């Protein structure tokens, strides 16, 4: 079994109004050291053991999980060893 952590963020070239709003709110709370905020998504998937887990996860990201026109993604795969 595998545990997959998927991180999806807007591409740097894409405006992030939600991130800008959070940055403004942090500044309003006197956290002026915050220079930039980018909002993204985090997903955890649990997959049955599969020889092609890397290719399968990449396919899932490109077909459904991320909008590759405006988002970048990366993922980490951990094998879960039953205890």
Image (cartoon, rainbow, N blue to C red):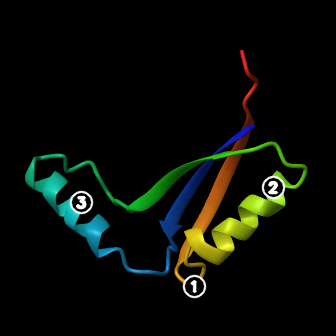
Residue positioned 54% across, 74% down in the render? 71
The residue carrying mark 3 is 23
Tell me which residue sits at (81%, 55%) in the image.
Answer: 54
Residue 22 drawn at (x, y percent): 22, 60
For the residue pair 13 and 41, the one nearer the viewer reads as 41
Residue 43's mark?
none
Between 74 and 50, the residue placed more toward the observer is 50
Secondary-structure class at tag 2: helix
Mark 2 closeness class: few <14, some 14–19, many ≥20 residues within 10 Å: some
| Mark 1 or 3, closer to the camera | 1
> How far is disc 1 from disc 3 in space, using C-alphas?
25 Å
In the depicted structure, whether residue 77 falls above or below residue 24: above
**In this picture, residue 28 sits left or right of residue 53:** left
Q: Which residue is mark 2?
A: 54
Kindly check if marks 1 and 3 are in contact, taking CB atoms under 8 A apart as contact.
Answer: no
Where, by quadrant of the figure, is residue 38 drawn?
bottom left
Label 1 vs label 2, nearer the camera: 2
**Which residue is the extreme one toward the top?**
83
Residue on which the image places disc 1 = 69
């Amino acid at each position: 079994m595998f545990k997959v952590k998927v991180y999806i963020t807007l591409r740097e070239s894409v405006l992030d109004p939600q991130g800008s709003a959070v940055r403004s709110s942090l500044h309003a709370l006197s956290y002026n050291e915050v220079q930039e905020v980018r909002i993204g998504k985090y997903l955890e998937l649990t997959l049955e053991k599969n020889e092609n887990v890397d290719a399968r996860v990449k396919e899932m990201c490109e077909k459904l999980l991320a909008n590759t026109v405006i988002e970048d993604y990366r993922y980490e795969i951990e094998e879960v060893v039953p205890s």
